[in-house]
Image: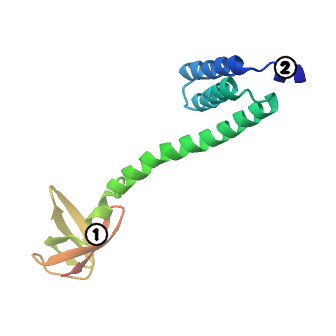
């Protein structure tokens, strides 16, 4: 068993790294790429420094363990930026909170209507005559709650 590990030389690491990267092409998921990169790094270090097989195995484990979380962090970083630029994505009515509109139909019995762009929305709030200005104070799905301005 030890002979197998001692036989690991720089070229074996380089070949393993390239093989893992080639497997990434067959089964995309960007996971094997990082393991391949770790193997390539160990292969390069083995060429330059000629460390023992124990250190090579340890370095591969460290590089692989560090590469996968690093990749996940990089991948998540793009998502955070998308959310930061458009926080109301998939919650479009939340973007209406704070905006003011003119009542198209009076609020009677707690229900009225406002026109927002090309759509008439039912709104809920205290009784208010048509033509009054109201501010949307809450949105829960398609239910908009308003208050008189």
- Can residue 123 be seen by looking at this rendering? yes
Q: Where 74 falls versus 116 (above or below)?
A: above
Horizontally, residue 50 falls left or right of residue 32, namely right
> Residue 35, percent across and down?
63, 30
In the displayed orientation, state which residue is furthest to the right.
1
Looking at the image, what colour scheme do you see? rainbow
> Residue 100, percent across and down?
18, 72
Say which of 47 and 106 sits in front.
47
> Residue 143, percent across and down?
32, 66
Where residue 144 sits, quadrant-wise, is bottom left
Horizontally, residue 38 falls left or right of residue 145, namely right
Residue under label 2, please give it. 4
Residue under label 1, please give it. 97
Give the number of the mark in front: 2 or 1: 2
**Residue at the image point whose x is 66% and y is 26% from the top:** 48
**Residue at the image point whose x is 65% and y is 17% from the top:** 15
Say which of 22 and 106 sits in front.
22
**Residue at the image point whose x is 28% and y is 63% from the top:** 95
What quarter of the picture does the N terminus occupy?
top right
Say which of 18 and 78 sits in front.
18
> Residue 141, percent across and down?
36, 61
**Residue at the image point whose x is 42% and y is 46% from the top:** 78
Where residue 57 sits, quadrant-wise, is top right
Query: Circle 1 — which element?
Result: loop
Query: Circle 2 — which element?
Result: helix
Q: Where 80 falls versus 96 (above or below)?
A: above
- Can residue 86 be seen by looking at this rendering? no
Q: Earlier in the sequence, mark 2 or mark 1?
A: 2
């Amino acid at each position: 068993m030890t002979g197998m590990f001692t036989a690991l030389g720089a070229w074996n690491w380089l070949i393993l790294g390239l093989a893992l990267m080639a497997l990434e092409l067959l089964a995309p998921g960007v996971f094997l790429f990082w393991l391949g990169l770790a193997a390539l790094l160990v292969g390069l270090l083995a060429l330059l420094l000629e460390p023992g097989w124990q250190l090579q195995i340890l370095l591969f484990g460290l590089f692989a363990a560090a590469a996968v979380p690093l990749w996940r962090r990089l991948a998540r970083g793009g998502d955070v930026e998308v959310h930061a630029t458009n926080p109301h994505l998939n919650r479009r009515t939340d973007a209406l909170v704070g905006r003011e509109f003119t009542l198209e139909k009076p609020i009677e019995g707690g229900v009225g209507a406002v026109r927002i762009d090309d759509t008439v929305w039912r709104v809920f709030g205290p009784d208010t005559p048509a033509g009054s200005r109201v501010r949307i104070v809450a949105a829960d799905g398609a239910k908009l709650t308003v208050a008189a301005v």
